[in-house]
Image (cartoon, grey):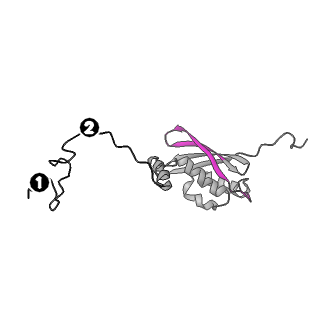
Protein backbone atom coordinates (compact mmCIF):
# COMPACT_ATOMS: atom_id res chain seq x y z
CA UNK A 1 0.00 0.00 0.00
CA UNK A 2 1.18 3.53 -0.80
CA UNK A 3 2.17 5.62 2.25
CA UNK A 4 1.32 9.29 2.13
CA UNK A 5 3.39 11.56 4.38
CA UNK A 6 0.55 14.05 4.99
CA UNK A 7 -1.83 11.39 6.23
CA UNK A 8 -1.74 10.45 9.94
CA UNK A 9 -0.27 7.02 10.57
CA UNK A 10 -2.93 4.33 10.48
CA UNK A 11 -5.40 6.37 8.43
CA UNK A 12 -6.34 4.69 5.19
CA UNK A 13 -9.05 7.08 3.97
CA UNK A 14 -8.03 8.47 0.54
CA UNK A 15 -10.79 11.13 0.71
CA UNK A 16 -8.72 13.61 2.66
CA UNK A 17 -8.41 17.10 1.13
CA UNK A 18 -5.83 17.21 -1.62
CA UNK A 19 -5.54 13.41 -2.05
CA UNK A 20 -5.52 12.11 -5.62
CA UNK A 21 -9.07 11.27 -6.59
CA UNK A 22 -10.65 13.24 -3.74
CA UNK A 23 -13.31 15.83 -4.44
CA UNK A 24 -11.04 18.62 -3.19
CA UNK A 25 -8.35 17.60 -5.67
CA UNK A 26 -10.82 17.85 -8.56
CA UNK A 27 -11.94 21.31 -7.50
CA UNK A 28 -15.30 22.14 -8.92
CA UNK A 29 -16.84 25.53 -8.39
CA UNK A 30 -19.40 25.17 -5.63
CA UNK A 31 -21.68 27.57 -3.84
CA UNK A 32 -20.68 28.80 -0.42
CA UNK A 33 -22.20 26.70 2.34
CA UNK A 34 -25.31 28.23 3.82
CA UNK A 35 -25.28 28.76 7.59
CA UNK A 36 -27.56 26.45 9.53
CA UNK A 37 -30.30 27.95 11.64
CA UNK A 38 -30.14 27.37 15.38
CA UNK A 39 -31.80 24.09 16.23
CA UNK A 40 -32.92 24.88 19.77
CA UNK A 41 -34.45 27.92 21.39
CA UNK A 42 -31.58 28.04 23.90
CA UNK A 43 -29.02 28.15 21.09
CA UNK A 44 -30.98 30.92 19.37
CA UNK A 45 -31.00 33.00 22.54
CA UNK A 46 -27.36 32.29 23.43
CA UNK A 47 -25.95 33.26 20.05
CA UNK A 48 -26.67 37.03 20.20
CA UNK A 49 -25.60 37.35 23.84
CA UNK A 50 -22.23 35.76 23.08
CA UNK A 51 -21.52 38.63 20.70
CA UNK A 52 -22.28 41.35 23.23
CA UNK A 53 -19.66 42.75 25.55
CA UNK A 54 -20.69 42.87 29.20
CA UNK A 55 -21.12 46.34 30.65
CA UNK A 56 -18.33 47.22 33.04
CA UNK A 57 -19.66 49.74 35.56
CA UNK A 58 -17.81 53.02 35.94
CA UNK A 59 -16.58 54.10 39.40
CA UNK A 60 -19.46 56.56 39.77
CA UNK A 61 -22.01 53.86 38.88
CA UNK A 62 -20.47 51.56 41.49
CA UNK A 63 -20.54 54.33 44.10
CA UNK A 64 -24.14 55.22 43.29
CA UNK A 65 -25.14 51.63 44.11
CA UNK A 66 -22.94 51.63 47.22
CA UNK A 67 -24.35 54.93 48.50
CA UNK A 68 -27.90 53.79 47.79
CA UNK A 69 -27.33 50.64 49.85
CA UNK A 70 -26.31 52.78 52.83
CA UNK A 71 -28.95 55.49 52.41
CA UNK A 72 -31.75 52.95 51.98
CA UNK A 73 -30.76 51.09 55.15
CA UNK A 74 -29.65 47.87 53.42
CA UNK A 75 -26.08 48.44 54.65
CA UNK A 76 -24.74 50.18 57.77
CA UNK A 77 -23.00 53.54 57.41
CA UNK A 78 -19.68 52.14 58.62
CA UNK A 79 -19.62 50.02 55.44
CA UNK A 80 -18.40 53.21 53.72
CA UNK A 81 -15.52 53.95 56.12
CA UNK A 82 -12.72 53.02 53.71
CA UNK A 83 -14.56 54.51 50.75
CA UNK A 84 -14.95 58.09 51.97
CA UNK A 85 -12.63 61.02 52.62
CA UNK A 86 -13.08 64.38 54.28
CA UNK A 87 -16.56 65.14 55.55
CA UNK A 88 -18.37 62.63 53.32
CA UNK A 89 -18.58 60.05 56.10
CA UNK A 90 -20.10 62.61 58.49
CA UNK A 91 -22.57 63.60 55.77
CA UNK A 92 -23.60 59.95 55.45
CA UNK A 93 -23.96 59.62 59.23
CA UNK A 94 -26.34 62.61 59.18
CA UNK A 95 -28.26 61.57 56.05
CA UNK A 96 -28.71 57.83 56.60
CA UNK A 97 -31.17 57.78 59.54
CA UNK A 98 -33.51 60.42 58.13
CA UNK A 99 -33.27 59.86 54.38
CA UNK A 100 -36.44 59.58 52.33
CA UNK A 101 -34.84 56.56 50.61
CA UNK A 102 -35.69 54.37 53.62
CA UNK A 103 -39.00 53.10 52.32
CA UNK A 104 -41.11 50.37 53.86
CA UNK A 105 -42.33 48.88 50.60
CA UNK A 106 -40.49 49.16 47.33
CA UNK A 107 -36.70 48.96 47.42
CA UNK A 108 -35.11 51.99 45.78
CA UNK A 109 -33.00 51.44 42.66
CA UNK A 110 -30.60 53.57 40.64
CA UNK A 111 -32.44 54.57 37.45
CA UNK A 112 -29.77 56.68 35.80
CA UNK A 113 -26.25 57.66 36.71
CA UNK A 114 -23.89 60.06 35.04
CA UNK A 115 -20.76 61.98 35.76
CA UNK A 116 -18.65 64.95 34.78
CA UNK A 117 -14.85 65.06 35.00
CA UNK A 118 -13.85 68.64 35.93
CA UNK A 119 -10.21 67.53 36.07
CA UNK A 120 -8.29 64.24 36.07
CA UNK A 121 -8.93 62.22 39.21
CA UNK A 122 -12.23 63.93 40.06
CA UNK A 123 -15.78 62.96 39.12
CA UNK A 124 -18.86 65.03 39.92
CA UNK A 125 -21.64 62.45 39.66
CA UNK A 126 -25.42 62.39 39.80
CA UNK A 127 -28.00 59.64 40.02
CA UNK A 128 -31.76 59.43 39.95
CA UNK A 129 -33.15 57.01 42.50
CA UNK A 130 -36.59 55.47 42.07
CA UNK A 131 -38.70 53.76 44.72
CA UNK A 132 -42.06 52.91 43.25
CA UNK A 133 -43.39 56.13 41.75
CA UNK A 134 -41.14 58.30 43.89
CA UNK A 135 -37.95 59.64 42.26
CA UNK A 136 -35.13 61.38 44.14
CA UNK A 137 -31.87 62.95 43.06
CA UNK A 138 -28.48 62.15 44.53
CA UNK A 139 -25.23 63.99 43.82
CA UNK A 140 -21.78 63.00 44.97
CA UNK A 141 -18.13 63.76 44.33
CA UNK A 142 -15.44 61.12 43.85
CA UNK A 143 -11.72 61.76 44.12
CA UNK A 144 -8.99 59.36 43.09
CA UNK A 145 -6.19 58.94 45.61
CA UNK A 146 -2.50 58.29 45.04
CA UNK A 147 -3.24 54.58 45.39
CA UNK A 148 -5.64 54.99 42.39
CA UNK A 149 -8.68 54.07 44.51
CA UNK A 150 -11.80 56.19 44.17
CA UNK A 151 -13.27 57.63 47.37
CA UNK A 152 -16.40 59.63 47.99
CA UNK A 153 -15.68 63.21 49.09
CA UNK A 154 -19.24 64.62 49.30
CA UNK A 155 -22.86 63.44 49.16
CA UNK A 156 -26.11 65.36 48.72
CA UNK A 157 -29.70 64.19 48.37
CA UNK A 158 -32.42 66.15 46.63
CA UNK A 159 -35.41 66.92 48.79
CA UNK A 160 -38.99 66.31 47.74
CA UNK A 161 -40.40 69.30 45.87
CA UNK A 162 -43.10 71.12 47.74
CA UNK A 163 -46.12 72.12 45.73
CA UNK A 164 -47.68 75.55 46.34
CA UNK A 165 -50.93 73.91 47.47
CA UNK A 166 -49.13 72.12 50.33
CA UNK A 167 -47.19 75.04 51.77
CA UNK A 168 -48.69 76.75 54.79
CA UNK A 169 -49.94 80.29 54.19
The x, y position of residue 96, in whole percent, is: 69, 56
Q: Report whether residue 106 is seen.
A: yes
Q: Which stretch appears magenta?
A: 103-128
Q: Which residue is mark 1?
A: 5
Q: Which residue is mark 2?
A: 29
Residue drawn at point x = 34 percent, y = 43 percent: 33
The x, y position of residue 3, in whole percent, is: 9, 56
- CA gap between label 1 and label 2 equals 28 Å
Q: Report whether residue 146 is seen.
A: no
The x, y position of residue 130, in whole percent, is: 68, 49
Left of 31 or right of it: where is 71? right
Residue drawn at point x = 50 percent, y = 51 percent: 45
**Chief secondary structure of the magenta span?**
strand
Residue drawn at point x = 62 percent, y = 53 percent: 67
Let me know if residue 104 is in the magenta part.
yes
Q: Is label 1 or label 2 in front?
A: 2
Say few, some or many: other residues with alpha carbon within 10 Å of mark 2 (under 14 / 14 to 19 / 20 or more): few
Closer to the chain start, of discs 1 and 2, is: 1
Q: Secondary structure at mark 2?
A: loop
Report the disc number at residue 163: none
Amino acid sequence: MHKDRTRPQGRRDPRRPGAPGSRAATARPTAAPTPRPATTAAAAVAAPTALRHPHRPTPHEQFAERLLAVLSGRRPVHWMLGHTIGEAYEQLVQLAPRTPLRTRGTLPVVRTCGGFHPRPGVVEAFASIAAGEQVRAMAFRLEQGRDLRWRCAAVELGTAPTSPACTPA
